Image (cartoon, grey):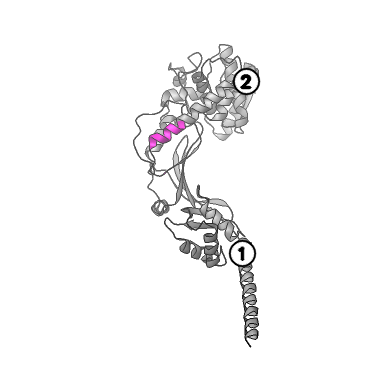
């Protein structure tokens, strides 16, 4: 009898072991195998959220098949207390192990909303965007100019809710005054700005910032970036340039920046001005004249008058010889490269061609023909300015 009981107990024990092994294998497969998501989603981890809260949310969103297995796997892997605050993109079919890695690896949020303060030549705009997880692209939620418009309710609510990424983006060719004035209206930054940085000293780029960060610190980062760019590119400059210092090169780069927005043209535009300097010709470029009028404080908003082209100012390159005394904007890296390594050409003139680019000429006669063609286009389009350099 006892032998029968012992035999039955042993059999039951073996069955239980097999069942436990099967359950363990099933759980391991559930944890490591492909997850139930049919398409990517955004998962938000609130500050101070517990593993239980997060696992229940994941199950409710369909990111994991069983919250309990997810918690057990997190405990077993030693990551149960490693959840990071933020919003994260969880791809379709992600396993529980992959989801846990995403939520504990830290770093910048990969999902959710972002605010980009874009400072352009004419105006600055705060743009709130949200990632559409299904398409992987950002959707614009709100946009406004903080200098003249109140913040939309969607933006105010997003700031109140938190979990935003912040960025300040400088457009190529923006002036230091415009950058400074725009940052004063950035409600997500703090602190005053003592003075406008020297023209040309700020690097156009995108800068990740922290909410509540100091405005002066953001400007310092922009200046440090531009200093590094000019230092790197000056060391690799071409020989025989008609300027002897990095400061003069930055003046040239800013002129190139304002004359063309087409990257492929920049080195050719630079070659025209380099050729003019080498031959002792006046640069005769409208953007410098405009800067002499506006001082970089806003957009002129009209064509230049004949009297302004004749007026003697340090920036009127129709009157002065050589370069103006300072840059006329903050040039981007490509324009600095163009100023330091221009194309080799015989061109001395260029004018708009009606397509957004320019047509170049070696002689005044060729240039006058090109100008006449542009004037015909200008008459049809009502375009006020031909751009480029004039004959003398």
Q: Locate the N terminus by quadrant.
A: bottom right
From the image, tell me which residue sits under label 1: 28
From the image, tell me which residue sits under label 2: 367
Q: Is residue 8 left or right of residue 192?
A: right
Q: Nearer the viewer, residue 78 or 39?
A: 78
Q: Locate the C terminus by quadrant.
A: top right
Earlier residue among tags 2 and 1: 1
The mark closer to the camera, 2 or 1, is 1
Quarter location, residue 363: top right
Q: Nearer the viewer, residue 333 or 349?
A: 333
Q: Is residue 33 left or right of residue 57?
A: right
Q: Nearer the viewer, residue 69 or 102?
A: 69
Extent of the magenta region:
210-222
The image position of residue 237, as x and y in percent, is: 59, 20
Element under label 2? helix
Whether residue 310 appears in this view of the structure is yes
């Amino acid at each position: 009898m006892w032998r029968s009981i012992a035999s039955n107990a042993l059999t039951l024990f073996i069955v239980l072991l097999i069942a436990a092994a099967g359950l363990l294998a099933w759980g391991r497969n559930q944890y490591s195998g492909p997850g139930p998501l049919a398409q990517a989603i955004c998962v938000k981890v609130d500050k101070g959220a517990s593993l239980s809260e997060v696992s229940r949310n994941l199950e409710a969103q369909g990111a994991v098949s069983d919250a309990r297995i997810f918690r057990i796997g997190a405990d077993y892997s030693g990551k149960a207390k490693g959840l990071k605050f933020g919003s994260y993109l969880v791809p379709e079919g992600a396993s529980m192990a992959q989801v846990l890695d995403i939520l504990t690896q830290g770093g910048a949020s990969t999902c959710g909303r972002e605010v980009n303060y874009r400072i352009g030549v004419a105006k600055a705009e705060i743009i709130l965007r949200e990632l559409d997880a299904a398409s992987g692209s950002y959707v614009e939620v709100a946009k406004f100019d903080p200098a003249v418009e109140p913040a939309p309710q969607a933006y105010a609510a997003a700031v109140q809710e938190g979990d935003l990424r912040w960025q300040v983006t400088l457009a190529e060719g923006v002036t230091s005054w415009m950058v400074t004035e725009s940052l004063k209206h950035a409600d997500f930054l703090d602190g005053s700005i003592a003075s406008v940085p020297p023209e040309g000293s700020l690097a156009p780029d995108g800068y990740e910032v922290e909410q509540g960060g100091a405005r002066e610190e953001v400007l310092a980062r922009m200046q440090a970036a531009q200093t590094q760019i000019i230092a790197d590119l000056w060391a690799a400059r071409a020989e025989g340039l008609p300027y002897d210092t990095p400061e003069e090169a930055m003046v040239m780069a800013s002129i190139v920046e304002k004359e063309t927005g087409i990257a492929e043209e920049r080195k050719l535009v630079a070659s025209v001005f380099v050729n003019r300097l080498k031959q002792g010709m006046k640069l005769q470029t409208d953007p410098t004249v405009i800067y002499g009028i506006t001082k970089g404080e806003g957009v002129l908003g009209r064509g230049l008058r004949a009297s302004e082209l004749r007026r003697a100012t340090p920036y009127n390159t129709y009157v002065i010889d050589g370069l103006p005394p300072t840059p006329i904007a903050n040039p981007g890296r490509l324009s600095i490269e163009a100023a330091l390594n221009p194309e080799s050409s015989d061109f001395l003139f260029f004018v708009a061609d009606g397509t957004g680019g320019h047509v170049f000429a070696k002689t005044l006669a060729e240039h006058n023909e090109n100008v006449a063609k542009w004037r015909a286009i200008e008459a049809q389009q009502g375009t006020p300015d031909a751009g480029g350099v004039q004959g003398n």
